[in-house]
Image (cartoon, coloured by chain):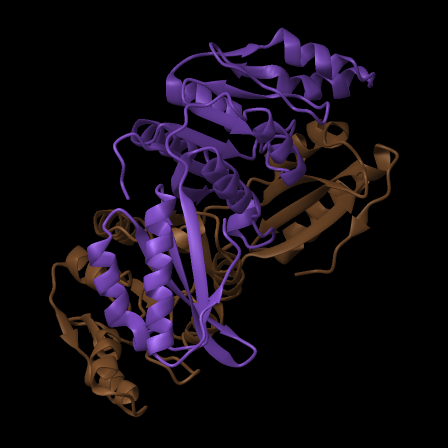
Chain colours: A brown, B purple
Amino acid sequence: MQSPDAVTAGALIIGNEILSGRTPDTNLNHLAVTLGGWGIQLREARVIPDVEAEIVAAVNECRRRFNYVFTTGGIGPTHDDITAECIAKAFQVPLVVNAEIAERIQQRPVPPDMMETRMRMARIPKGAWLVDNSTGGPQGFRLDNVIVMAGIPEIMRAMLATLEGKLDAGPVIHSRSVTAYLGESQIARGLGEVQARYPDIDLGSYPFFRDGRYGASLVMRGTDIGRLEEVLEEVSQLIVEAGEVPHRAEDE
Amino acid sequence: MQSPDAVTAGALIIGNEILSGRTPDTNLNHLAVTLGGWGIQLREARVIPDVEAEIVAAVNECRRRFNYVFTTGGIGPTHDDITAECIAKAFQVPLVVNAEIAERIQQRPVPPDMMETRMRMARIPKGAWLVDNSTGGPQGFRLDNVIVMAGIPEIMRAMLATLEGKLDAGPVIHSRSVTAYLGESQIARGLGEVQARYPDIDLGSYPFFRDGRYGASLVMRGTDIGRLEEVLEEVSQLIVEAGEVPHRAEDE
């Protein structure tokens, strides 16, 4: 399924609150689904703490490995919001006040010491350009191939949405899936054979336990819908041969 | 908050289905909360694809950086279940059939070709020992400091639960939190000052957007409950001084 024209991405979910378990992350899934629909394949995601050395190292590693890196979290006004500084350090550029973000921040009248604190959010690495924020709050930014977004899911989604159509895209990966109440072992050999005959399709078997019964979802992913339909047919046949009923999911 | 006797962990969530967005991960949060309660701090989590080279590299990097590495996913019977092989490669040991897992697999009578497939799950790296599975299915395993568990949440949880009291533990990190409907900027300066005076406490500010209003949760984490209570009091006072009402969460 690795195609030479694939456009890839890594995600960095920045925040101690995810690692402590206090907050379950929901940004990763939204990012994966949205990017996938745009023809950008999420290849790795990391949840990392609010620690400068770790953020800098992860940004530098991932920006070289993937076409894009998307970060979420750490761009607010408090002392633990260090993402912008870390991106600047990773690229070895200074932080500068961006006039456009500053203007947006200053539109909302607040007491002077609070304004000073809010203005922290106007600092972005030199050379970065803005990622708009349709909620009206301070913008995110992009430097080279690193896109920096808020951690609050509503704001992250608003920022991400503004990038639609503005990023490089590879072939969109389509998927088909079929589910059955069976043990994976009942069809494992056949699945392996189908996978071997369709190396361009990524055929996954995902077991689940639901209402006291085991089952498996068989998911095929690839860029060629005709080939996907062939694999779907073959896998459905394996399920029938195992004496079970294939339930096809809606096409994605 | 970095204590010299901290016991740390990294998590590797293995599976294309998480990266494609098809399946939202829930294992990470359970792992973070459970380990935290045992005195093991989750310091990083990675979601990686079912690709041998990437799994091997991530295992080798993480097992050297953290006291423990917990993996989820990829230990079933199908062709895309390659975690056991990858762990063996990472440690440069062969895969061997474990008699105890084999016995459990053979307890359930199935046709011969299906049994052969299921027996894939009995192969573990040489030198590994078992992590029990109270659901009655095949066990997980542990090799050195790497603990390998299933991806199905119910089974992962059953495996993890059997490790309670069996792992090294550091001081348990306790937390306190207080929430208010205010902009983070209203108290950001004060928070920074409190953080500077309590370097042993990790003070985080997590903004949220709920019912059309912005708010922030202020979370303090540390090993000393007396110090936590002091910080809680100071932060609550900052909220009051900002003209808002502090809502204390239940103690954790």
In the image as oriented, which residue stretches furthest toward the top? B99
In the image as oriented, which residue stretches furthest toward the right? A243
The quarter of the picture where residue B195 lies is bottom left
Q: Position of residue A173 (x, y in %)?
A: 54, 57
**Residue B64 seen in this snapshot:** yes
| Foreground pick, A76 / B233 | B233
Q: Position of residue B194 (x, y in %)?
A: 25, 61
Residue under the image location 79 percent in, 42 percent down: A180
| Foreground pick, A182 / A224 | A182
Above or below for A236 versus B39 = below
| Foreground pick, B142 / B23 | B142
Residue under the image location 59 percent in, 37 percent down: B151
Q: Is residue A236 left or right of residue B209?
A: right
| Foreground pick, A192 / A160 | A160
**Residue A200 seen in this snapshot:** no
Above or below for A48 versus B155 = below
The quarter of the picture where residue B146 lies is top left
Residue under the image location 26 percent in, 89 percent down: A106
Q: Position of residue B217 (x, y in %)?
A: 43, 65
